[in-house]
Image (tube, rainbow, N blue to C red):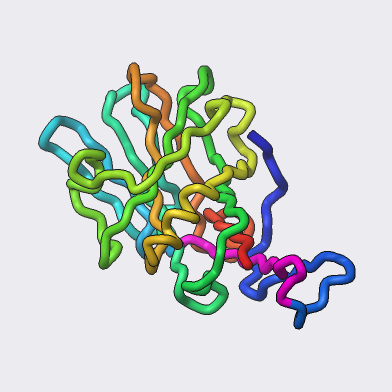
């Protein structure tokens, strides 16, 4: 896993071409375009499961809600799964006929609690319209993953207080093939024995949102 400095939102895309490439020559290499999309703070959120039939849904960031959570609460033992929504069809999005070259998710890790141990993380591509969370979105059987990636290595205490860049290219390729309007992610502790560590992801709504909120960077042609 590679940590990068925080990135500032750039709705305008950067065009990168190889030296000597003729834009009018269809036989030349493709021109790559890179766009950056902040998550939609109105639809980001998390779901906490406290029993097989009890759930608490938090959706929409505000001055009092600035984070989303994933993992298992070290004291209460409840499980959280975080959800991030990136609009693909608005200005600065990804054209429906684009071919994906790469996609990276940047998240700022506020904390891992307690301050010991590592947490294995699974990221699912999901889809639901409108993007309003309901209890069944927590369940991978009722809201199945369209594609998934597992972070390797797991998040560690060294990642707390840093920005983490995650390769989600397979998920973005799948989303594009399906023609999804939004790139929707479910972030959870990887399947297996429960590890009581809670991951807190920054989802700031203030002036520093461009530096700390979840960011999707997609390169396409």
Q: How many discs mark residues in the rendered view?
A: 0
Residue in the image at 44% along x and 48% along y: 67
Tell which residue pokes out farthest to the left in this image: 53
| Magenta-drawn segment | 26-39
Q: Residue at the bottom extreme?
A: 24
Question: Residue 191: which quarter of the image?
Answer: top left
- At x 40% / y 50%, what residue is drawn? 185
Residue drawn at the location 61% of the way across and 32% of the way down: 159
Residue 145 visible, this orientation: yes
Residue 65 percent across, percent down from the top left? 40, 53
In which quadrant is the C terminus drawn?
A: bottom right
Task: Please check the rendered image and state whether residue 107 is part of the magenta-colored stretch, yes or no.
Answer: no
Give the left or right position of residue 94, taking residue 177 as reference.
right
Image quarter where the N terminus lies is: top right
Which quadrant of the view contains residue 61? bottom left
Please tell me in which quadrant of the rendered image residue 64 appears. Answer: bottom left
Q: Nearer the viewer, residue 101 or 82?
A: 101
Q: Where is residue 27 shown, x and y percent of the image? A: 74, 71
């Amino acid at each position: 896993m590679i940590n990068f400095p925080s990135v500032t939102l750039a709705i305008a895309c950067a065009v990168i071409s190889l030296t000597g490439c003729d834009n009018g020559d269809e036989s030349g290499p493709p021109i790559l375009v890179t766009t950056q999309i902040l998550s939609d703070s109105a639809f980001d959120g998390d779901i906490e499961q406290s029993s097989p039939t009890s759930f608490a849904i938090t959706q929409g960031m505000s001055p009092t809600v600035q984070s989303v959570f994933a993992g298992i609460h070290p004291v209460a033992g409840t499980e959280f799964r975080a959800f991030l929504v990136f609009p693909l069809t608005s200005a600065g999005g990804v054209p429906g006929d684009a071919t994906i070259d790469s996609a990276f998710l940047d998240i700022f890790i506020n904390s891992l609690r307690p301050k010991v141990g590592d947490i294995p993380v699974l990221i699912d591509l999901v889809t639901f319209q409108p993007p309003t969370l309901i209890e069944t979105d927590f369940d991978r059987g009722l809201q199945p993953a369209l594609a998934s990636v597992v972070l390797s290595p797991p998040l560690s205490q060294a990642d707390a207080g840093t920005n983490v860049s995650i390769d989600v290219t397979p998920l973005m390729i799948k989303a594009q093939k399906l023609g999804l309007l939004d790139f929707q992610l479910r972030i959870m502790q990887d399947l297996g024995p429960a590890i009581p560590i809670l991951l807190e992801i920054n989802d700031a709504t203030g002036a520093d949102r461009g530096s700390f909120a979840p960011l999707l960077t997609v390169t396409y042609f």
